[in-house]
Amino acid sequence: MVGLNCLEVNQVQSVHAHQGADKFYFVLEGSGRFRVGDEERQAEAGALVLAPAGISHGVVNNGNVRLSLLVAIAPPFK
């Protein structure tokens, strides 16, 4: 499953996990603070963030423009 996620300034994607499916975020525009497991990192346009299956993850747009993300989950949900 592939999609486009857009977070407005200060918008949060709550921490969650996907059992049996890896997820990646490719930052198209803007920047955000990503949490994967116990680690946090800032990522901006051109960065790739991977959340392995079963590991909690989430993101907050702490920048000053919309955060646009190409997101993929594999294998897809059934």
Image (cartoon, rainbow, N blue to C red):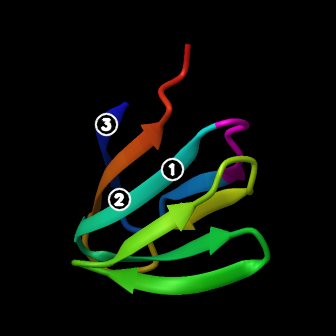
Up-down relation of residue 7 to residue 63 (above or below): above
- Work out how far the residue at label 1 is from the one at label 2, CA to CA, in angstroms: 21 Å
Q: Which residues are magenta?
A: 15-20
Q: Earlier in the sequence, mark 2 or mark 3?
A: 3
- Work out how far the residue at label 3 is from the one at label 1, CA to CA, in angstroms: 10 Å
Mark seen at residue 23: 1
Q: Quadrant of residue 52?
A: bottom right
- Residue lying at 68% horizontally and 36% vertically, measured from the top left: 20
Q: Secondary structure at mark 2?
A: loop
Q: Secondary structure at mark 3?
A: strand
Residue bearing the label numbered 2: 8
Q: Secondary structure at mark 1?
A: strand
Q: Position of residue 34 (x, y in %)?
A: 55, 73
Q: Quadrant of the C terminus?
A: top right
Circles 3 and 1 in contact, beta carbons < 8 Å: no
The type of residue carrying mark 2 is Glu
Please indicate whether residue 9 sits to the left or right of residue 15 in the image: left
Q: Nearer the viewer, mark 2 or mark 3?
A: 3
Number of other residues with Cα within 10 Å of mark 1, as a class: few under 14, some 14 to 19, many 20 or more: many
